[in-house]
Image: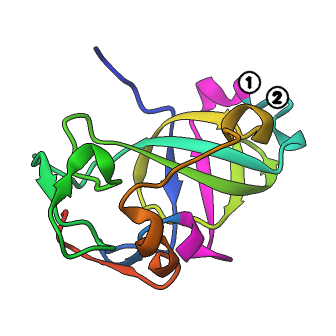
Amino acid sequence: MTFKAIGVIRSPFKDLRNMPIQPVAAAGVKGTVEVFREYQPGLKDLDGFSHVILLYHFHRSSGFALRVVPFLDDEPRGLFSTRAPRRPNPIGLSVVRLLKVEDGVLHVENVDILDGTPLLDIKPCVPEFDRPAEIRTGWLEMAKKRASKTKSDGRFG
């Protein structure tokens, strides 16, 4: 498998510490997604969507453990029941608000991504496709209320 970056994500976050840990904690934070010239024709019609899903490479993350202590808990959890960035395939996913598309640049809001992160893909967010009717959130049921106030502490850098 080989993946190639199609662009770069720009945000105000230059350090892994004190970053929002999810888009809900980045409300109002603006950034840009610079799409490389050869991929810009693929942006046609994207400006009709209010939100996009960004898939990206956790380029500052190395290694992984199958049990981690996530930001929102003190108990070790199975890696795949968390959104910890140190993973066997370090792929991140964020749903951000799309403000506008201009000259190959997406202007976005609610960005929880490190500046300079390589972009792998963009998909339109469609609630009817992306939001199952009934969702259980496991161990996060109680902890998710703290997500909007919790910042990263560098434990996964």
User: Which residue is at the far right?
Assistant: 48
Residue 135 lies, in percent from the top left, at 58, 47
Q: In this picture, which residue range is highlighted in magenta?
A: 23-42
Residue 120 lies, in percent from the top left, at 47, 34
Q: Is residue 146 visible?
A: yes
**C-alpha separation, residue under disc 2 versus residue under disc 1:** 6 Å
The residue carrying mark 1 is 41
Image side of residue 138 versus residue 69, left or right: right
Residue 129 sits above or below residue 131 on the image: above
Label 1 amino acid? Pro
- Please state which of residues 140 and 5 is positioned toward the viewer in this rendering: 140
Image side of residue 106 versus residue 154, left or right: right
Question: Mark 2–mark 1 contact, CB under 8 Å?
Answer: yes
Instruction: Check residue 44 in the rendering and tell me which mark sits there, or answer none.
Output: 2
Whether residue 83 is in magenta: the answer is no
Determine the image quadrant of residue 142.
bottom left
Callout 2: SS = loop
Callout 1: SS = helix
Q: Is residue 114 visible?
A: no
Q: Please report the residue visible at 65 percent of the width from the left and 33 percent of the height from the top.
A: 123
Q: How is the image coloured?
A: rainbow
Q: Please report the residue visible at 37 percent of the width from the left and 73 percent of the height from the top.
A: 14
Residue 105 lies, in percent from the top left, at 69, 48
Residue 154 lies, in percent from the top left, at 21, 73
Instruction: Check residue 154 in the rendering and tell me which mark sits there, or answer none.
Output: none
Which quarter of the image is occupied by the C terminus?
Answer: bottom left
Image side of residue 124 versus residue 50, left or right: left
Residue 35 sits above or below residue 22 on the image: above
Q: Please report the residue visible at 66 percent of the width from the left and 38 percent of the height from the top.
A: 132
